[in-house]
Image (cartoon, rainbow, N blue to C red):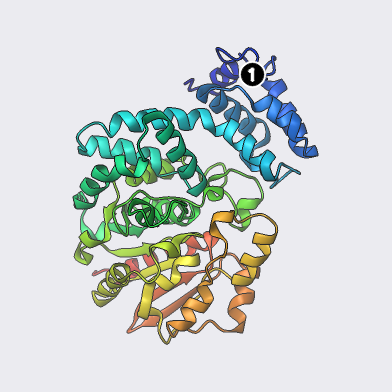
Amino acid sequence: APTSARARADAASDAPAGAEGTGWIAGGAAERVTGLHTAFRSGDAGRALELLTGGTAESNAALMASYRGRYGRDLEYDLRGFATKGLSGAALKRAWQALHGPRLEQTAASLAQLTSQSPTAEVRKAVYGHLAQAGGEERAALAEAFQKKTGRPLTEALRPVFAAAQAAPPNLTSPPEKTVAIFVSSGNWKDVAQGATDKPVGGYHWREVEGYVKEALDRGFTPVLFTPDGLPPSPDALSLLQGRFGPLVGFGVGADRGPDSPQGKVILDGFAAPSAAKHFDPSKFATLHIAGGHGSHQDLVGNPLIEQAAAAMHAQRKPVTAVCHATPALGRLVEGGRATGFSPQLDKLTQKAGYVLPEFNPTFDAHAALRRLGAKVGPGGTLKAVANPHHTETYLRGGVPVITGTGPEATDNVARLALDWLARSAPR
């Protein structure tokens, strides 16, 4: 695929091979970009589908790059109606498939080739690289494409890869005092892999990983990524969509915060080889962070291994942090102290406005879960979570901080608070 912006735009201006009769609209990239934008603004599903039908993985990638360059938002951001009228219902599903289907067919072919090999570290990284940005909707479409191509269930093909990945301990190269552990959700990959359900659900929110990683890198720390079971991270897909104003309140991601950013590339490298929680050794890390997301309760909250990891870090007098829907994953560490998480009232409002994917319905009530653990989430907690997306709570338990944040935009703050405390507490 072309790498420069101009090359991508040039590639998008040419109809893909075999597009005759598919509905592909002739003309340059600029015409298609502006045509799609106009269609999204007016909710013209027919025109949008006409412009999207018949693309290839490469031409669609170029089209999306051109759209982002022109409007500062991802094409799918507008397709879903977050800054435009957008599409809905069956039309949205058809347009989404037209946009992403060709790429998913390529991914299915790549996974078929990779899973036919021995699950070496290199193969595992390639497989996880394909899966780590796939939310529930994409995982379902990918499984369908794989079954159609190979005649085999995707989970069956992935089983040896997952087993090898789960057995591999983390590769730690930096000194413990300069290494941070970050736990990220795999959504319900475990249930899907075990055949307990055939409906994939995503997990992590991108900003709740990215904000912490950026702060850690800026201060000279090395981040190491974990998932509860060593399975691929799986996102709330909307958290990866680039927008302009939504990211200011934690919806989507800004242009300098996405997977193409310096910290984003470090995250994706970590996502390709996450370690399982069973391999966690608190003596190897300076602090621990638990990233949330609408699906993080699927495998992080109530997980004994996660609670044990947090408790072990605290026992070694090291700060622990968590944000959003994952703050109850800290377990009894929050008992008796003030804590916060994503507001259930705000969840209801955003869900009604279409900012929460159907796979996360019903949404998880982090405040109720915190209260069940004995944390203090007072009347002011809900208001702060709604009115101040940067809000944090610090509970000094035995003089060591347990820090929680309301949501995505609080991630930078919890990272600063934890790393500042480490700097103050370091031997002189």
The image shows residue 243, relative to residue 307, as above or below, that is above
Tell me the residue that label 1 is attached to: 22
What residue is at 40 percent from the left and 69 percent from the top? Answer: 301
Q: Amino acid at mark 1?
A: Thr
In the foreground, 60 or 253: 60
The x and y percentages for residue 351 are 65, 60
What residue is at 55 percent from the left and 68 percent from the top? Answer: 342
Q: Which quadrant holds the C terminus?
A: bottom left
In the foreground, 77 or 163: 163
Is residue 254 left or right of 332 when viewed as pictured? right
The x and y percentages for residue 349 are 68, 64
Q: How many numbered discs sit on the rendered protein?
A: 1
Query: Which quadrant holds residue 31?
Result: top right
The x and y percentages for residue 416 are 43, 63
The image shows residue 367, relative to residue 253, as above or below, that is below
Assign a secondary structure to mark 1.
loop
Query: Which quadrant holds residue 352?
Result: bottom right
What residue is at 65 percent from the left and 27 percent from the top? Answer: 52
The x and y percentages for residue 150 are 36, 30
In the foreground, 263 or 322: 322
What residue is at 43 percent from the left and 54 percent from the top? Answer: 209
Q: What is the crowding at mark 1: few (fewer than 14 residues within 10 Å), some, or many (at least 20)? A: few
Is residue 213 left or right of 83 when viewed as pictured? left
Q: Is residue 389 visible?
A: yes
In the foreground, 92 or 229: 92
Q: Is residue 338 visible?
A: no
Is residue 312 left or right of 89 when viewed as pictured? left
